[in-house]
Amino acid sequence: MSDALQKPINTKVIKELLDINDSARIRTWLSICASCGLCAESCLFYLAKNRDPKLSPAYKVRTTLKELYRRKGEVDREFLEKCYNIIWGECTVCRRCSLFCPFGIDISIMIATVRGICHSQGIAPAGLLKASDNYRASGNQMGMSKEDFVETCTWMAEETAEEMRGLEIPIDKQGARIMYTVNAREPMYYPQDIAMVAKIFTVAEEDWTMPSTGWDDTNLAMFAGDKALAGQIVKNMYTKALELGVQAIAITECGHAYRSALFEGPYMLGYRSGKPPLPIVHSVRLFYEYLRDGRIKIDPDKMLEEPVTYQDPCNVSRNGGLWEEGRAIMKYIAKDFREMTPNSIYNHCCGGGGGFIPMGAEFKKRRIESGRIKAEQIRATGAKIVISPCHNCFDQIKDLNTEYNLGVKVIQFKEVITEAMIIPEKFRPVDTDDEEAQD
Amino acid sequence: MNEFYEFLTGPALWAAFIIFIVGLSVRLTYLYGISKERDRVLYNHVNVKWAIRSIVHWLIPLGSVGLRNQPVFAIAFFLFHLCLLGVPIFLLAHNMLWQEAFGVGLPSLPDSIADALTVVFLLAAAVLLVRRIVRAEVRFLSTAWDYFLLILTSAPFVTGFLAYHQIGPYKLTMILHVLFAEILLVIIPFSKLGHIVLFFFARVSLGFEMGRRGARTW
């Protein structure tokens, strides 16, 4: 936890937040839960920890939000610290339980509400608060300067142009069809991700641009319970897109970024319509369309031969509606695709969602423990490759791979597509040897 | 005793029905009132198809994965609700009372079927009760109130069954039958049993929430 200042709890603020969130839905959910326990078996924390009844979603809400309302916000630090452990340490807001509840009670909204309340009292995981500081200072979670970002893109463009003729990484191009946004980890640690997507866009002849601001589509403030900042982060992106006059914002292979930009963002910003000002499209959908429309063609000889499984990111599949698109892409790129059980909308969270990965070392032990369910799912498929279009899943599965000796390789779609796509003649690099020979 | 029975089936019954209906209406009206500003999701993403799917999949037996995972419970759960609604509404003895009071009544089930359904209901209720006790995660969630409501819901059926078969002191069982039923009616609007209507509201709400995400709504 953040060493947050052992300042006294401001119950007035808590009461205000309880009042703002006192909606018809939350009121209904808290009052009609029939204690049927069906949600328990849906939860990876419950399953991973030997079916500890304290980990059923219903119990987690009952001991946090319901108790806050019952006490009318008159709680002490000790209570909020107990909540802290539950809302960040025992829930990834993956929304699986909502599909198992007869009333469709949305536990994730209520957990997020408690996160907001704890955050208002300076109680939040240090890893997330650090990211928040970075967002405030630089607009992205890694604290990268605008110059560094643009430079990274330029560097990648120069480097990759040698491999692909005509490749460009346009920055702030007015009126492009799509504005492609990334997870700040990409320019910071995986710049080749940007190069890969540039290749895909080049071959697909996409009219795209990267923005020089509002390019980080992640939103860890959303997971920290900092609604104001979370809204600002989304707004940076919307504003830039409107300024550039693009038709849509594309989101990199990242789950929560999609959730933030398309579904939560408009509400965090208090937009009455609940809709973003322009369409938001996820990479999975975009890549699927390229393949479907033949804008990208896969070389059958370069399809993945080894058994492959798909880790559905909660925010792409269950909460993003793209589970079929993910599988459709698999048909193009994998010869031996194997489903996990359960999968698609019912897939388990990897255990790295809801902010868990950036919450860092303090939560790592629990993250690996709860990830056992995912590790077992992956092992059961016999797959050697796990594809997941989400940075958090990616990190978590890499960790699980080490901890549980899974012997798998974790990759994203863009990596496979870049490797396997047919590069049309016009984009192939000019063979310098030939040139010399002609001379 | 006779006078008490007269009271229960007269003014007390009126009061119970009125509290039941007014209570539920007030609760719904209040929720509607606060929803306008605080639950924009309900108004921004309205889609009848999402809502209907969300509801129907949880009304039909084994219509959702949550129910399929626990089939015995799911069947008991379905029969419990079916009989709970069906038997009292279509019971001949009840309809005769409506007929006497208002000159109109609903079609009635033959007594033998109503009797069999009462037994089915009680068996289903027993399954729910046993499950609540046996399964650790459900026991852990259950409070005395949960047990009380389950038993209270079953009480009019037990007493009704005894009265119909003339087992035990008839007058007393009839008094208890009406009394339990009235207590139940009065409690419904103010407890988790409000799900009698709020089930639909909650499912529609999830329907819109998941539907707007292009995702499955049940």
Image (cartoon, coloured by chain):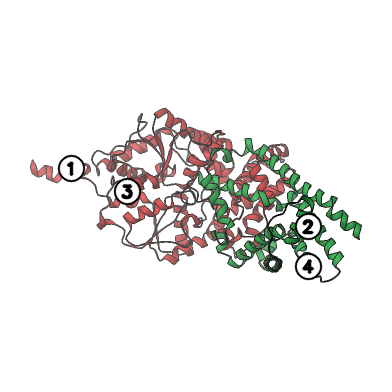
Chain colours: A red, B green
SS assignment at label 3: helix
Q: Position of residue A8 (x, y in %)?
A: 72, 40
Q: CA distance from mark 4 to mark 1?
A: 94 Å
Parent chain of label 4: B
Q: Quadrant of residue B2?
A: bottom right
What residue is disc 2 on? B181
What residue is disc 1 on? A430
SS assignment at label 2: helix
Q: Is residue A315 left or right of residue A172?
A: right
- Label located before the other in sequence (4 or 2): 4
Judge depth for marks 3 and 2 and give the one in front.
Answer: 2
Q: CA distance from mark 2 to mark 1?
A: 87 Å
Q: Quadrant of residue A338?
A: bottom left
> Can see residue A42?
yes
SS assignment at label 1: loop
- Label located before the other in sequence (1 or 3): 3
What residue is disc 3 on? A292
Q: Kindly identify the amino acid type of the residue bearing the numbered disc 2.
A: Ala
Q: Of the numbered discs in the image, which one, if any, rests on residue A124?
A: none
CB of mark 2 within 8 Å of CB of mark 1?
no
Q: Residue at 29% of width from left, 37% of height from top?
A: A168
Q: Is residue B133 left or right of residue A278?
A: right
CB of mark 4 within 8 Å of CB of mark 3?
no
Both marks 2 and 1 on one chain: no
Disc 3 residue crowd, few under 14, some 14–19, many 20+, Cα 10 Å: some
Q: Kindly identify the amino acid type of the residue bearing the numbered disc 4.
A: Tyr
Q: CA distance from mark 3 to mark 2?
A: 61 Å
Is residue A234 or residue B135 the one in the foreground? B135
What residue is disc 4 on? B164
Q: Position of residue A124 (x, y in %)?
A: 61, 45
